[in-house]
């Protein structure tokens, strides 16, 4: 029984360190703001919802790797491939690549939730394939290559 005490103490210390390290990185990273804005607008998702996913899933740690989940939005390689990704799994640790494939996946969850953000977060985390299939929406799900949902910006014409 005496030999168990040091192991459990070591485990408790490790968990404490991991938790404190995770909470220390949960602050938004200003360098990500333009990327988050671009992909949120492109796919019709509120920026704050993308930020909530990033904070919850990775604590804004772009190098987060948890078993089969990668990067800021903790997207799986299989899911990213379904969204059009063709690179190696490690490529999903790049913030822009991760947002390129994670945000359209979130957009699909948001659409299936009819704009209910709490439900969208739940669907993002648990998956929504069967719900989309049941609603006959598999053919209209967004991918990284989907056209932008942003309103086109007016083009200034040359004055005569």
Image: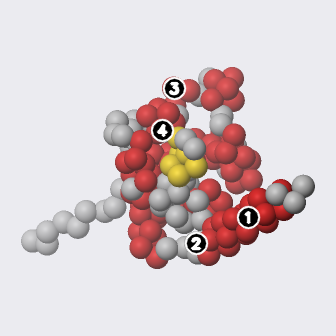
* Label 2 – label 3 distance at C-alpha: 37 Å
The residue where tag 2 is placed is 25
Residue 71 visible? The answer is yes
Q: Label 2 crowding class (10 Å Cα cut-off): few <14, some 14-19, many 20+?
A: some
Residue 3, percent from left and from top:
82, 57
* Label 1 – label 2 distance at C-alpha: 23 Å
Q: Tell me which label, 2 or 3, sits earlier in the chain.
A: 2
Q: Nearer the viewer, mark 4 or mark 3?
A: 4
Q: Label 1 crowding class (10 Å Cα cut-off): few <14, some 14-19, many 20+?
A: few
The residue where tag 3 is placed is 139
Q: Tell me which label, 1 or 3, sits earlier in the chain.
A: 1
Q: Tell me which label, 4 or 3, sits earlier in the chain.
A: 4
The residue where tag 1 is placed is 10
Residue 78, numbered circle: none
Q: Nearer the viewer, mark 1 or mark 2?
A: 1
The quarter of the image holding the N terminus is bottom right
Query: Toward the viewer: 64 or 16?
Result: 16
* Label 1 – label 3 distance at C-alpha: 51 Å
Residue 107 visible? The answer is no
The residue located at (65%, 37%) in the rendering is: 127
Residue 77, numbered circle: 4
Q: Tell me which label, 4 or 2, sits earlier in the chain.
A: 2
């Amino acid at each position: 029984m005496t030999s168990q005490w040091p192991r459990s103490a070591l485990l408790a210390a490790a968990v404490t360190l991991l938790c404190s390290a995770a909470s220390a990185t949960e602050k938004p990273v200003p360098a990500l703001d333009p990327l988050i804005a671009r992909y949120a607008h492109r796919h019709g998702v509120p920026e704050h919802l993308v930020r909530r996913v990033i904070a919850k899933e990775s604590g804004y740690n772009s190098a987060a790797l948890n078993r089969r989940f990668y990067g800021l939005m903790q997207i799986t390689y299989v899911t990213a491939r379904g969204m059009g990704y063709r690179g190696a799994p490690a490529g999903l640790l790049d913030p822009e690549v991760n947002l390129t494939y994670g945000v359209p996946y979130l957009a699909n969850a948001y659409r299936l939730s009819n704009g209910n953000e709490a439900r969208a977060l739940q669907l993002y985390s648990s998956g929504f394939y069967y719900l989309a299939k049941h609603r006959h929406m598999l053919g209209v799900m967004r991918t990284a290559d989907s056209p932008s949902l942003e309103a086109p910006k007016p083009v200034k014409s040359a004055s005569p």
